[in-house]
């Protein structure tokens, strides 16, 4: 496939600066691009690469045009490039189709149109699958669970009983949805299991990464809000409520009954204690430990997590500790000398 720069600009609603008849035959990153490729620049720190890249043209924003190459100026270069990548490198993963002969389907299962169920997958009794659902090999869908239209479930996913999965959800390999919450009552040194009888509700347009674990609620439901994206190896405990369009990065751990608001971003390896609230539009930077509520539209960092600038000042002070100890030793020595002089007088 090949397109001119003018044709691509029309697709992404951008403005061509330079030769609009430049022929584009592919798309790649700014470092990896070769002749004929179009690339993009969304982060100004990579601006020096604009004149070094071998790409034929660059998608960029209005404030980053320091190049002799043809460019397409657009408000969101990253989003524009997503559209172009889809055009030049269509998804040819080749999802399976049809219901494999080895799949086990229980009683009273409701199947929508154009269903795919891979080899050795097990569908429990009274399960409802919407239209265009794709379930890869080796998956387990527990009884009374519901899966919405056009949801994609990759291999070896376990969805326990009575779980609700919305439409256009993507669940990557190895995820476990609806395992028991971690609840025990300790009596005389023995840990007695507390039944976990709630559910998990995953709303529309959610993406769940590989080996993510989401526990069912103790009584009510654990909720993953519409449009939220969860990276690999995240643990979400029972009765957690995550709002809409949140971004949860790899290895985050969220303890029970915590509420995470809309549009929240949790960086990699963030840990949240239970029964706290992260306000809408808040951000917690990577490896932070959060032990109390985070107000809306704030940035918290550190362990324990605190407002970002407070944490930065504390870290800066820590770097000066050796110098401060040296100063204290000198002052202590001078005080001792003064005390000796006073004593002698």
Image: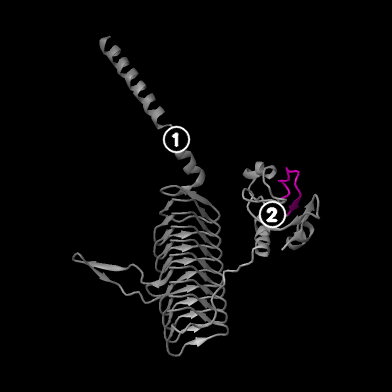
* Crowd tier of the residue under label 2, counting other residues whose Cα lies within 10 Å: few below 14, some 14–19, many 20 or above: many
| Number of the label disc, if any, that sits on residue 317 | 1
Q: In the shown orientation, is residue 12 left or right of residue 215?
A: right
Question: Mark 2 or mark 1: which comes first in sequence?
Answer: 2
Quarter holding the C terminus is: top left
Q: Nearer the viewer, residue 44 or 340?
A: 44
The residue shown at (28%, 14%) is: 340
Whether residue 216 is visible: no
Q: x%, y% of residue 200?
A: 44, 73
Q: Are marks 2 and 1 in contact (CB under 8 Å)?
A: no
The residue shown at (56%, 64%) is: 245
Q: Is residue 269 magenta?
A: no
Q: Which residue is mark 2?
A: 37
Dot 2: what SS? strand
- 258 relative to 53, above or below: below
Mark 2 vs mark 1: in front: 2
Dot 1: what SS? helix
Q: Which residues make up the magenta segment?
A: 61-73
The residue shown at (78%, 61%) is: 7
The residue shown at (26%, 13%) is: 343
Q: x%, y% of residue 225?
A: 52, 68
Query: Which of the 4 image quarters holds residue 156?
Result: bottom left
Q: Main secondary structure of the magenta part?
A: loop
Q: Nearer the viewer, residue 222 or 63?
A: 63
Seen from this angle, which residue lies furthest bottom? 108
């Amino acid at each position: 496939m090949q397109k001119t720069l003018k044709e691509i600009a029309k697709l992404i609603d951008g403005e061509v600066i330079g030769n609009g008849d430049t022929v584009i035959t592919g798309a790649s990153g700014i470092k990896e691009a070769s002749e004929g490729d179009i690339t993009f620049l969304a982060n100004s720190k990579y601006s020096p690469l604009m004149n070094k890249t071998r790409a034929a043209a660059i998608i960029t924003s209005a404030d980053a045009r320091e190049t002799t190459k043809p460019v397409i100026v657009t408000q969101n270069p990253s989003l524009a490039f997503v559209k172009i990548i889809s055009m030049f490198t269509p998804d040819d993963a080749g999802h399976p189709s049809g219901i494999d002969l080895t799949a086990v389907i229980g009683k009273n299962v409701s199947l929508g149109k154009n269903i795919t169920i891979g080899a050795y997958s097990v569908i429990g009794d009274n399960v409802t699958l919407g239209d265009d659902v794709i379930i890869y090999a080796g998956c387990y869908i527990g009884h009374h669970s519901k899966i919405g239209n056009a949801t994609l479930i990759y291999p070896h996913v376990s969805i326990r009983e009575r779980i609700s999965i919305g439409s256009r959800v993507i669940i990557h390999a190895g995820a476990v949805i609806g395992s028991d919450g971690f609840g025990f009552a300790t009596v005389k040194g023995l840990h007695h299991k507390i039944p976990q009888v709630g559910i998990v509700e995953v709303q529309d347009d959610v993406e769940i990464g590989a080996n993510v674990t989401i526990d069912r609620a103790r009584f009510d439901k654990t909720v993953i809000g519409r449009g939220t994206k969860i990276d690999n190896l995240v643990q979400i405990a029972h009765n957690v409520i995550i709002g809409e369009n949140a971004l949860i990065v790899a290895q985050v751990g969220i303890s029970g009954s915590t509420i995470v608001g809309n549009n929240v971003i949790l960086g990699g390896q963030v840990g949240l204690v239970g029964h706290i609230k992260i306000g809408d539009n808040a951000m917690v930077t990577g490896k932070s430990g959060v032990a109390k509520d985070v107000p809306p539209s704030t940035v918290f960092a550190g362990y324990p997590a605190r407002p970002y600038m407070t944490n930065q000042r504390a870290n800066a002070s820590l770097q000066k500790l050796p110098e401060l100890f040296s100063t204290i030793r000198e002052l202590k020595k001078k005080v001792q000398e003064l005390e000796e002089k006073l004593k002698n007088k």
